Image (cartoon, grey):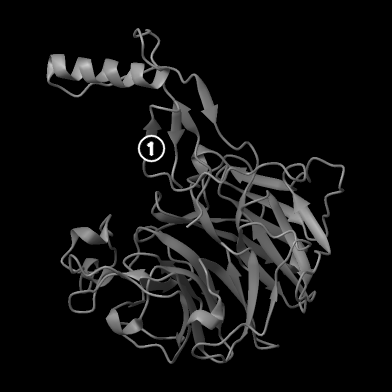
Amino acid sequence: MLKKAFILAVLLASTTLQGAAPGQQVARAVSAAATDTGKTVRVERAPVRRLEDPHSSFSAVALDVARDEIVLSDENLAQILVYNRLDNTPPQAALTEPKRIIGGPLTKINLNCGTYVDPVSGDIYSVNGDTENWMTVWSRQAKGNVPADRVLAAPHRAFGVAVDEVAKELYLSIEHPPAIVVYPKLAQGSEVPIRILEGDKTQLADVHGIALDTRNQLLYVINQGATTQSKGNMYWSHDVKPGAKTVEWTESGEQWRGTIPGSGKFSLPSISVYPLKAKGDTAPIRVIQGPLTRLDWPTHMSLDVDHGDLFVINSVTDEVAVFHATDNGNVAPYRSIKGSHTGLKTPHGVYADTKNNELVVANFGNHSATTYRLNASGDAAPVRTIRAAFPDTPAPMFGNIAALAYDTKRDQILVPN
């Protein structure tokens, strides 16, 4: 999963060890100190250089249709940016200045990967990913480094958010252990969810994007494919005590009896469909899955109920795949947006604007958000582009950095994202 850019500090020793490369100097100095004392050694040195992306990289998008505003999650710089819907960065311009920005340490924004805008109030809902276990809610007047108006404690690895405005219910997708957790729309603090969809029969597997069809009472879920078996078809439900009004989520699902060690597996990515009120270990009513689907690292999706179209982001292949909302099985998308003229680069978020007949895509790989006709197909150029950097500015896409390696022969640091 794409995450916010990571500021990588390369710490090198200030004391030279003869015959050693700079990186080796640090390793040998720390190793020698640890051997001498038999204790863990803490080394504090200023970085010689920093590898970072100073520009916004967009991970999710939502529209405030009533006010003609585009709301973008910037996972790289940990902030939310709001633009006018009709903003279009001129080719010679470095960027388009947003109308307002929410960001800074007081905001609790980090690895923000899911966004929703209340169609009436304009409140902005922002989901943090792997490192921060909460969802923040902001009034449409919020800007700068300010605390959220409302904070909801979420299970670890939350990703997507959607709201049933009729039933006033809030849906969060949880990557692993895979689940859909449903709350009252105005839930906050450590409030207990209304229901949880989880278990082996659900076929949930590394859950990412979600979409709601309140007209036909359906829930659509993107699965990237990794999962483990559960004990008793429960994961997160283990933390919800009967009769309790609050819940303290366990940090990691592997710590509970809910997962079976050694049962991990990978399956093909899929889109699974459930009754909107599904809970517990409920099987999907249909599943889009198989080689014909071209699903490849799918992230977010958006549903156009009026035309029966399901727009799905294929992040790795730089594609927006469009399925019929009624599709089932190993079926190919009936159209897609893909090609050198589209401006798509590692897309991550998508929003179907049915009022203006447009489709907006958040691109993580080139500091842009691109807008297309809702019926666009093939190598279609965007009708507008919002950029946060000059065209062709490199985007290193530092992601969920879990490890570093040092190549002593080439004096290079290797960073897997």
Q: Is any part of residue 119 visible from this angle?
A: no
Q: Residue furthest left?
A: 38
- Viewer-proximal residue, 395 or 155? 395
Q: Residue at x 70, y 46 (%)?
A: 100
Q: Residue 51: where, in percent of width, then height?
A: 54, 31
Q: Which amino acid, by three-letter code, is at mark 1?
A: Leu
Q: Residue at x 75, y 68 (%)?
A: 66
Q: Residues within 10 Å of mark 1 (few under 14, many from 20)?
A: few
Q: Residue 101: where, in percent of width, then height?
A: 66, 45
Q: Residue at x 70, y 88 (%)?
A: 307
- Viewer-proximal residue, 294 or 82? 294
Q: Dot 1 corresponds to which residue?
A: 404
Q: Is residue 151 left or right of residue 281?
A: right
* Secondary-structure class at tag 1: loop
Q: Is residue 285 left or right of residue 50?
A: left
Q: Residue 176: where, in percent of width, then height?
A: 34, 64
Q: Is any part of residue 18 visible from this angle?
A: yes
Location of residue 27 by image quarter: top left
Q: Is residue 352 left or right of residue 16?
A: right
Q: Residue 230: where, in percent of width, then height?
A: 22, 74
Q: Is residue 236 left or right of residue 175?
A: left
Location of residue 321 by image quarter: bottom right
Residue 125 vs 25, above or below: the answer is below
Residue 126 vs 47, above or below: the answer is below
The tally of labels here is 1
Q: Residue at x 47, y 82 (%)?
A: 289
- Viewer-proximal residue, 333 or 200? 333
